[in-house]
Image: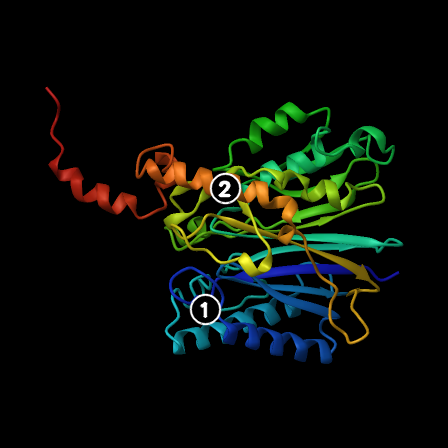
């Protein structure tokens, strides 16, 4: 049987009034490009949305992961959108498009990508996470809670299809290498790595019993591509749920509370990860706080399930009042952190600041240092 691929490819190509939100003309361009691609049989279905100032292209197709035609479609969409953004003088127009030439894959060119190919089950609920003003390792804590923490995911204890645990692929962004660790037997080793969020990030998760893929995340770090700070990485993540996987309720449950992630203003600060509905996915205070949206879809016969008029059926999970407590926590934590100004730990440590603009300031002071007697 033909497998289905779910792809989400994102880029910051321009925003209204700073780093706040995607402009409607960019949505219009993206929707037209993807609709044309659907009519021409390149993709089966799509949904365009935003996480803060990032334009998110969610697509289903049967072409597999890393397909050149799918990636070219996304790249051309971003390039057309960036051209419009430049004409409108939007802020940061085309900032995630680091290279001019497309070479068959958008990875390494700036946009973030998460893709998953799988054989459809009788019912396949999928949760799409998209974040703004943070880095890919922001998902480390979330994925640990979903797939390795029985206090969050009861299925790890009471579902025989899950009691064998899950395998995590951990990517080392500095050395461009990865390692696979299995839980629960290697849980402590897993935490030893993914707790160091400046370097390590969870890229894929499989069910141990049958190696069935259940989660995939983007791993693009723009600073390591460009060699300097050019913007936040703003990651995306795909998680399958139910029927031997964590339930959808368990997948989104970790966001009953906020937690700290790096990024926020100029990619240089710790900030609370705030779950929001699509209408509130706009970054304001100190260009934040870092935001995350969670959309639920049903994958059906290679497509996003839709209504009789062809509109995709989308569940905007974080608009629910059940997450009001986490938003309140995030606001209170952001107020506390900003009272600290530019003192650590509100600001990131020296290692993380190497790729920001801070070294330029310090280099100006270097000639003035004298040996201390």
- For the point 87% across and 53% down, which residue is it? 121
Q: Position of residue 344 (x, y in %)?
A: 34, 32
Q: Does the CB distance between marks 2 and 1 fall below 8 Å?
A: no
Q: Is residue 1 visible?
A: yes
Q: Which residue is mark 1?
A: 100
Asked which secondary structure carries label 2, the reply is: helix
Q: Position of residue 164 (x, y in %)?
A: 81, 30
Q: Which residue is mark 2?
A: 330
The correct choice, above or below, for 227 with respect to 72 in the image is: above
**219 lies left or right of 300:** left
Quadrant in which residue 166 is drawn: top right
The correct choice, above or below, for 19 with respect to 43 in the image is: above
Q: Position of residue 101 (x, y in %)?
A: 49, 69
Q: Quadrant of the C terminus?
A: top left
Quadrant in which residue 195 is drawn: top right
The type of colouring in the image is rainbow
Q: Position of residue 42 (x, y in %)?
A: 71, 74
- For the point 30% across and 38% down, which residue is it? 342
Quadrant in which residue 303 is drawn: bottom right
**250 lies left or right of 366:** right
- For the point 85% across and 44% down, which residue is it? 243
């Amino acid at each position: 049987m033909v497998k289905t691929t779910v792809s989400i490819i994102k880029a910051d190509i321009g925003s209204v009034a700073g780093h706040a939100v995607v402009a409607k003309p960019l949505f219009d361009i993206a929707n037209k490009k993807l609709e044309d691609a659907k009519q021409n049989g390149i993709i089966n279905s799509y949904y365009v949305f935003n996480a803060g100032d990032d334009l998110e292209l969610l697509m289903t197709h049967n072409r597999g992961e890393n397909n050149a035609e799918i990636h070219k479609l996304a790249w051309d969409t971003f390039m057309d959108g960036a051209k419009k953004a430049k004409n409108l003088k939007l802020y940061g127009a085309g900032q995630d498009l680091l290279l001019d030439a497309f070479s068959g894959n958008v990875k390494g060119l700036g946009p973030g990508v998460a893709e998953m190919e799988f054989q459809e089950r009788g019912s396949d609920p999928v949760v799409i996470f998209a974040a703004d003003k943070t880095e890919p390792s922001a998902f480390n804590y979330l994925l640990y809670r979903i797939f390795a923490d029985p206090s969050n995911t009861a299925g790890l204890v009471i579902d025989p299809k899950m009691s064998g645990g899950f395998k995590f692929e951990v990517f080392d962004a500095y050395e461009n290498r990865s390692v696979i660790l299995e839980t629960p037997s290697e849980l402590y080793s897993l935490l030893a790595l993914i707790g160091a969020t400046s370097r390590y990030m969870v890229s894929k998760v499989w069910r141990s019993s049958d190696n069935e893929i259940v989660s995939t995340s983007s791993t693009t770090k723009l600073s390591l591509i460009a060699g300097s700070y050019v913007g936040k990485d703003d990651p995306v993540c795909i998680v399958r749920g139910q029927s031997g996987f964590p339930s959808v309720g368990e997948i989104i449950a970790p966001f009953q509370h906020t937690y700290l992630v790096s990024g926020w203003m100029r990619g240089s600060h710790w900030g609370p990860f705030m779950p929001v509905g699509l209408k509130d996915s706009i970054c304001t205070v100190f260009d934040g706080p870092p935001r995350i949206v969670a959309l639920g879809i049903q994958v059906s016969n290679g497509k996003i399930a839709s209504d009789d008029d062809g509109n995709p059926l989308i569940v905007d999970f974080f608009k629910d009042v059940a997450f009001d407590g986490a938003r309140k926590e995030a606001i209170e934590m952001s107020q506390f952190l900003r009272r600290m100004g530019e003192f650590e730990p509100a600001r990131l440590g020296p290692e993380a600041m190497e790729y920001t603009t801070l070294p330029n300031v310090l280099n100006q002071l270097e000639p003035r240092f004298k040996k201390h007697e």
